[in-house]
Image: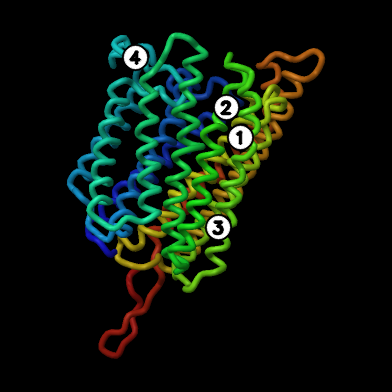
Amino acid sequence: MHYQSQAVAKPYFIAAIALFVGQILFGLILGLQYVIGDFLFPAIPFNVARMVHTNLLIVWLLFGFMGAAYYLVPEETETELHSPLLAHVLFWIFLIAGALTVVGYLAVPYATLAEMTGNDILQTMGREFLEQPLPTKLGIVVVALAFLYNIGMTILKGRKTAISMILLMGLVGLAVLFLFAFYNPSNLVKDKYFWWWVVHLWVEGVWELILGAILGFVLLKITGVDREVIEKWLYVIITLTLVSGIIGTGHHYYWIGTPGYWQWWGSIFSALEPIPFFAMTVFCFNMVNRRRRQHPNKAATLWALGTGVMAFLGAGVWGFLHTLAPINYYTHGSQITAAHGHMAFYGAYAMVVMTIISYAMPILRGREANPERAQVLEMWSFWLMTVSMVFITLFLTAAGILQVWLQRVIPNPQAFMQVQDQLALFYWMRWLSGIVFFIGLVVYIYSFFTKDKLQTVEVGTVQPAAT
């Protein structure tokens, strides 16, 4: 570890993985509720389990992004973090606020929670992904601003690089766009129009800048390729991302009451969105092929390559499958959307957080890479999670195609719940794939506690070291 303040990242990474476990557990609960409707009812209703599942996804990724920033910014700027104390304080504020919010979801009916937390003062609750109570939303803003101050001051006093500036741009965009979570107009069209300014412009806009910066940093460290080469690739990828992603927001505007020109703008520019992800895949493999050193952390290299491939498949290919208006007319809101969402979030964001954790955590623990036995387990976890996510996506895609056909295409469309009964086989297979994914996550965590059976020499004797 080059800078002492990089150690601040460690609790963020640990919290991210712990919350990731929680997210997957609630995902498994949801998967069973699709086929066993009263599973855990009324203790954990479907709508509550869904809120916890999606909110934990957002929170653990934010913990991962913040940890990544605290780790890479001191190294990129060649200076210590502006205030490690502030970073530690923000960690506990964010963690406690997130935990209390989840407890609120589980312990109190949502309408009661809204009354208790001042939703009558400023109505912000009730929308997908933005279900957080008003105090939690305000807490997120405070944490984001203080975090940006800490990172910004560090960059200001140190060396400026393309990686750190792209990361800062993405983090600023993340904070600014979240402010639209407080705008909840009574007009439903306006509500959905600006709701996408948070949801879409996060995941298909500024988050991709964060993704590119983290991936570029890790590839720089594990390949030894010239910084200039990596920065040129990043500039191209980020430009393509912003041009296609910002205007591509229009593919969410097709059927919500907005003007018809959005069908053209949305179709054309969202069809271009796979290009930056394809460029990212080429970038990853190109950098690894041109590497000047064989980094001992093979697991981090695998995660980096996997991020490029899975992001392209999930966000690029599966996004393109139903992004054009004439196709989206039939597919929007179906299980095809769920298939795209699962692989895109895992491939683009979950995997890049795992990449930086895989690279940074061994260094934070005082070694360049985990022992070989631990890396073998970690690579097994990579394949278990990645292959199972592919199957989850394929089963949801098959369910979505059948759903669209029976519910929206045939001459006498069937009712929603009637169709859902006919998708049960796909839902069961999706759930079993989710179990395999969870096993892979457990193996990933276990790998960090695994040590090689080493031998130490003491006074002419060879003794096995403790494992």
Q: In the rendered view of the protein, which quadrant contains the N terminus? A: bottom left
Q: Give the number of the disc on residue 332.
A: none
Residue matched to label 1: 270
Q: Which of marks 1 and 4 is nearer the N terminus?
A: 4
Q: Are marks 1 and 4 in contact (CB under 8 Å)?
A: no
User: From this viewpoint, which residue is outermost toward the bottom?
Assistant: 460
Residue matched to label 2: 250
The crowd level at tag 2 (other Cα within 10 Å; few <14, some 14-19, many 20+) is: many
Q: Which of marks 2 and 4 is nearer the N terminus?
A: 4
> Looking at the picture, does residue 119 appear above or below residue 166?
above
SS type, badge 1:
helix
Q: Spatial distance from mark 2 to mark 4, Cα to Cα? A: 31 Å
- Residue type pointed to by label 2: Gly
Residue matched to label 4: 114
- Residue type pointed to by label 4: Ala
Residue in the picture at 35% in, 45% down: 168
Instruction: Indicate which label's residue lies in the foreground, 1 or 4.
Output: 1
Q: In this view, does 410 lie to the left or right of 80?
A: right
The crowd level at tag 4 (other Cα within 10 Å; few <14, some 14-19, many 20+) is: many
SS type, badge 4:
helix
Q: Is residue 340 left or right of residue 49?
A: right
Q: Spatial distance from mark 1 to mark 4, Cα to Cα? A: 36 Å
Residue in the picture at 29% in, 28% down: 100
- Residue type pointed to by label 3: Phe
Residue matched to label 3: 283
Residue sitting nearer the eye, 45 or 186: 186
SS type, badge 3:
helix
The crowd level at tag 3 (other Cα within 10 Å; few <14, some 14-19, many 20+) is: many
> Looking at the picture, does residue 241 appear above or below residue 382?
above
Q: Do the residues labelled 2 and 1 touch (CB within 8 Å)?
A: yes
